[in-house]
Amino acid sequence: MTSDAGGQPYDADLMAAVTELGTALRELVDASVLTTVPADELRAAAADARAVTARLAAAQRPATQLPALDDPLVFRRVYNPVSGVGSALAPPVRIRRVEGGVVGEALLGPAYEGPPGYVHGGISSLLMDQLLGSAAIAAGLWGMTVRLELDYRRPVPLSTPLALRAQVTEAAGRKCVVTGTVATAAVPDRTLVEARGVFVMPREELHADYFGAITDASGRHRPPGRPTDATALTDRT
């Protein structure tokens, strides 16, 4: 067993296996986007994929039950669609705290393509929502996204190391304002996408409405004290 600072212990072998499967699934997605094999090979691959799906579906948790490896207190969400190591959808983005906010690193392959050769604008929005929320958490704040504005200055290139940055610029009561940018790692001062988000802590009386059905991995009713569906944060360097 191992644990993050301040978090609950977790099964390191299970984490390694989830990470391995997530990596393999992302490789499969990339291959499926680029492949030019003939139709019979595609059908054979589809049959193999369905067989794997059946194996994984043999034992499943309810959607309202948190995965065994998740720990909302330290914002570990292994299937988060942006930063989750077990997610086939996630690049994943690596996020870490720095002085004044957070930074992230990512490389988006052809599965995230919008205009030919460039990242889909909706993916940039997804990444910035995650990063802005992470910056709020790093500042000791939290909340759910109520507004997200993006200024697409230049297209974001595919298969290119990206540098993401975010910081809290205003905080008052239940609300905070966070800003961030996307650039290439090679030219980090040349902003490609600029974002501004408003995050608001839900009123206490709404917690039951939002999270009343959530349980921990053992099935106990232990809803998160704060929403973390879009705010997973890791401390990897």
Image (cartoon, helix red, strand yellow):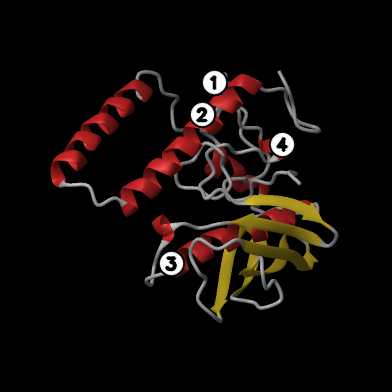
Q: Position of 212 compared to 63: left or right? A: right
Q: Which residue is mark 3?
A: 120
* 23 over 230 or under it: above or below: above
Q: Amino acid at mark 1?
A: Gly
Residue 73 bears which disc, if any? Answer: 4
**x%, y% of residue 99?**
85, 59
Q: Secondary structure at mark 4?
A: helix
Q: Which residue is mark 2?
A: 65
User: Between disc 1 and disc 3, whose residue precedes?
Assistant: 3
Q: Residue at x 66, y 37 (%)?
A: 72
- Check whether the beta carbons of the residues at disc 3 and disc 4 lie within 8 A of each other: no
Q: Secondary structure at mark 2?
A: loop
**What whole-number distance in Å separates the C-alpha atoms at marks 2 and 1?**
7 Å
Q: Amino acid at mark 2?
A: Gln
- Check whether the beta carbons of the residues at disc 2 and disc 1 lie within 8 A of each other: yes
- Figure disc tally: 4
**What whole-number distance in Å separates the C-alpha atoms at marks 1 and 3?**
38 Å
Q: Position of 103 compared to 54: left or right? A: right
User: Between disc 4 and disc 2, whose residue precedes?
Assistant: 2
Residue 219 bears which disc, if any? Answer: 1
**x%, y% of residue 86?**
52, 36
Q: Amino acid at mark 3?
A: His
Dot 1 alpha-carbon crowd within 10 angstroms: few under 14, some 14 to 19, many 20 or more: few
Give the foreground label among 1 and 3.
3
**What whole-number distance in Å separates the C-alpha atoms at marks 4 and 2?**
16 Å
Q: Secondary structure at mark 1?
A: loop
